[in-house]
Structures are given as C-alpha cells and as structure tokens.
Amino acid sequence: MGRKRVSLKHSMTTSDISEVPAEAAPTETAKHHSPGKNAMEWIGIIAAALLAALLIKTFLLQAFYIPSESMVPTLKISDRVLVNKLSYRMHDVHRGDIVVFKRPPSEASDPTIKDLIKRVIALPGERVEGREGHVFINGKELQEPYLPAGITTLDFPAQVIPAKSYWVMGDNRPRSKDSRYFGPIGSNLLVGRAFIRIWPVPHIHLL
C-alpha cells in the first residue's frame, strides 16, 4: 500500500518503460529466437517479397528497356520506362498514348522482337492516311507537337482502323517500323501504357 504510484501523465512515454513492474517484463526465453526459427522467418519474408514483386510485374507495373531509336527524341536507346498494365482496364486507349505491345503476328518470323513501344495515332473506326508529309485522321491533319521540327511522314494509303485495333507509329518516322509495315495492332496485344521514363536518372519525367 505504501508503494509510490507512477503518474498516468508519464506512464506511456518512452522514458517511462523502466517503470513497468518486473513481473510484466518478457522472459529470457521470449527475447531470443532459435537460429532455426530466425531462418524460417527470413525465408518467409524473402518469399513474400518475391511473390509481391511477381504480382506487381504481372498485373501492375513493369520496367522496359528501349533497344532502338524508333521513338527518338521522346525516348532514346538505353532509356528505361515504367509501364502501367492496369491503365486500359480502367479507361480507353487515348490518341497520343505511348504503348508497349506484344510482337504482331506478322512479325513472328523475327525472334529478336518480343515487345515494341510506339505512339497511338489512330483509334478504332477512324480513317488514317499519310500524305504531303503529314498524318491525316478522318481527312483532318493531325497536330503532332511531340515530333521534332522538320520531321515528315512518308505517304501511306488511307485505311479505316478495325474495331478493337489501333494505328501506332514511332516518333522517329524515318527510322520506325510500325503500323505502316505491320498494320493496326489488336487491343489483345497491348501490354500497357508507358507513363514515366525512369532511366537515366537526370532525365526522369512523365511521358
């Protein structure tokens, strides 16, 4: 009955931990884990981290390396971009989007091609044409501010984009193998939308 009570005002602060009665302190057995238990805990942590990384890469985000100059000057060789794989489950594909897509069937003969990155130019149902050095959508010239000054587009015949398909082209028009060669790509080939350049570090920016 004569013991001095600890003030509630200070009982919950870090400096008051020593005031906890001795009987409430953890036992020596509880403080130390066996080497086997520690190993199992680390294995569990590593497995969970690997699973999380796999799920993120499969369903959410994935980094891609740029191997060619087809998107210069927007993206250069050795740049790395982060691709959002959920984008087109949440909203439609937009003109101007930079997309990563799987190798079109017509390019199956080239095993070096796995994924490509291009810009969406025309959407399903639209009539696209290249003439007079420019791209025309439904007869109206497309404004392309992302192209460097002086870049022109070689003529290509007009065609209507099928349903669930997209016309894609590289920003480096003279050096890009794109829909002008393999035609529109189906929505089933889309991997996701490239939304940020993450490498090199000094040039990180949203796309």
Image (cartoon, rainbow, N blue to C red):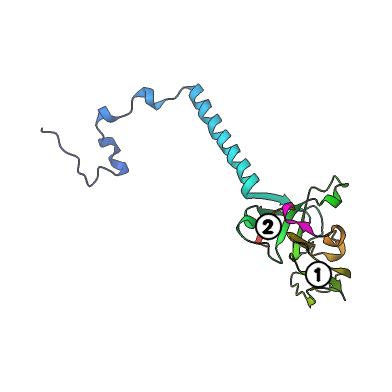
As helix, strand or loop, the secondary structure at mark 1 comes to: strand
Above/below status of 51 relative to 193: above
Which residue, given by chain and number where applicable, does mark 1 sit on? 128
As drawn, 160 above or below 24: below
Residue in view at x 33 percent, y 25 percent:
27
Q: Disc 1 marks which amino acid?
A: Val
Query: In the visual, does 87 lie left or right of 156?
Result: left
Picture residue at 73% right of the left edge, 59% below the top: 164
Q: Which residue is mark 2?
A: 193
Q: Secondary structure at mark 2?
A: strand
Residue 3 in magenta stretch: no
Total labels drawn: 2
Mark 2 and mark 1 lie on one chain; the one further toward the N terminus is 1
Front residue (pair 18, 166):
166
Which residues make up the magenta segment? 184-188
Q: Position of residue 99 (x, y in %)?
A: 72, 58
Q: Nearer the viewer, mark 2 or mark 1?
A: 1
Between 66 and 182, the one lying in front of the other is 182
Q: Position of residue 144 (x, y in %)?
A: 76, 72
Query: Can residue 4 be seen by looking at this rendering?
Result: yes
Q: Residues within 10 Å of mark 2 (few under 14, many from 20)?
A: many
Q: Nearer the viewer, residue 30 or 158?
A: 158
Q: Nearer the viewer, residue 94 or 161?
A: 161
